[in-house]
Amino acid sequence: MRKFGRYATFMKNAILISILILLFSCKTHSKNETLQYTIINKNAISDFKKELKTYTKIQELRNKKIDFIAYKKHSIGSIRLRRADDLNNCPSCISNFSIYLIWREKENQYIQIFDNCGSFLPVNIENTHILEFANKNFNIINLERIKYYQVDKKTVSMISHSEFKDFLLSRQGTEIYNYFDVYNLTTNSEKPNLNYKYNQNLKIIELNNLIEEELEKIEAKNLFKRDLSKCK
């Protein structure tokens, strides 16, 4: 009986140890999985959609089911300096973020800026393939996730102040959301980002680059003009 009791105790301990090992291995695997890809918070999606509801033009496009791209650039804890001679300033407001709206009306495509101070006048887009690219890759962009700036298989690199970009794409009334931290797209020679090439080849990044190229052209020509009558 004593031998049986010792055997039962041994087996019981062995089973407990096996369970603990199994749980630990599962936990470690889960950690490695979440380490690689960035996660989109559901609250971020709903918050961005609610924010867009405050803009009349976006609501108009939604109601008419007109395809559009809403693109936001913002930084946590950033401060924008304002030039006194800038004609695009609102007298009693400093802009701290920008939302760019891209849409098509008949044969023309437009881009318009909205911020916490008001809005700018719409500007014609030269590159009319931006919306076409977004619509063509709509489902792919919906599923894509940026990978972290990864130094090795178990280590990611982060910074406290970075720039973030939010995208909401609307196609025939269906909306999808994606976002990324710009820092995850960078790399350097001392600590190379293992996910640099992967991230650069994503469709969401290609779309971002198309928009940024168009913005640079428009800004170089100084075509963005604030609608001073809409200043808050």
Image: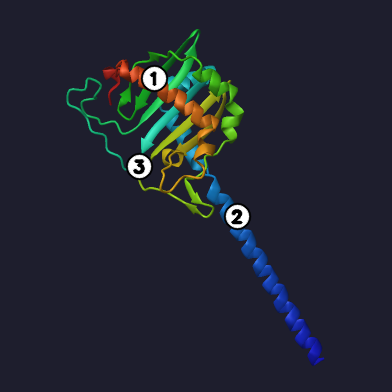
> Which mark identifies residue 76?
3
Q: Residue drawn at (43%, 42%), measured in percent from left and top?
A: 187
Q: Residue at x 45, y 38 (%)?
A: 185
Left or right: where 109 falls relative to 83: right
Q: Amino acid at mark 2?
A: Ser
Closer to the eye: label 2 or 1:
2
Residue at 47% in and 17% down:
103
For marks 2 and 1, give the CA distance: 42 Å
Residue 30 numbered tag: 2
Q: Seen in the image, is 32 located left or right of residue 190?
A: right
- Residue 82 visible? The answer is yes
Query: What is the x, y in percent for residue 79?
Result: 27, 38
Q: Name which residue type carries label 1.
A: Gln
Question: Is 185 positioned to the left or the right of 90 in the image?
Answer: right
Mark 2: which secondary structure? helix
Q: Which mark is residue 17?
A: none
Q: Residues within 10 Å of mark 3 (few under 14, many from 20)?
A: few
Circles 3 and 1: CB atoms closer than 8 Å: no
Q: Position of residue 28 (x, y in %)?
A: 59, 59
Crowd around label 2: few <14 · some 14–19 · many ≥20 (10 Å): few
Which residue position is annotated with label 1?
Answer: 112
- Residue at (21%, 22%) from the top-left corner? 86
Q: Where does the N terminus fall, quadrant-wise?
A: bottom right
Q: Which of the two marks, 2 or 3, is nearer to us in this view?
A: 2
Closer to us: 194 or 215: 194
> Where does residue 118 sit, x and y in percent of width and height?
32, 24
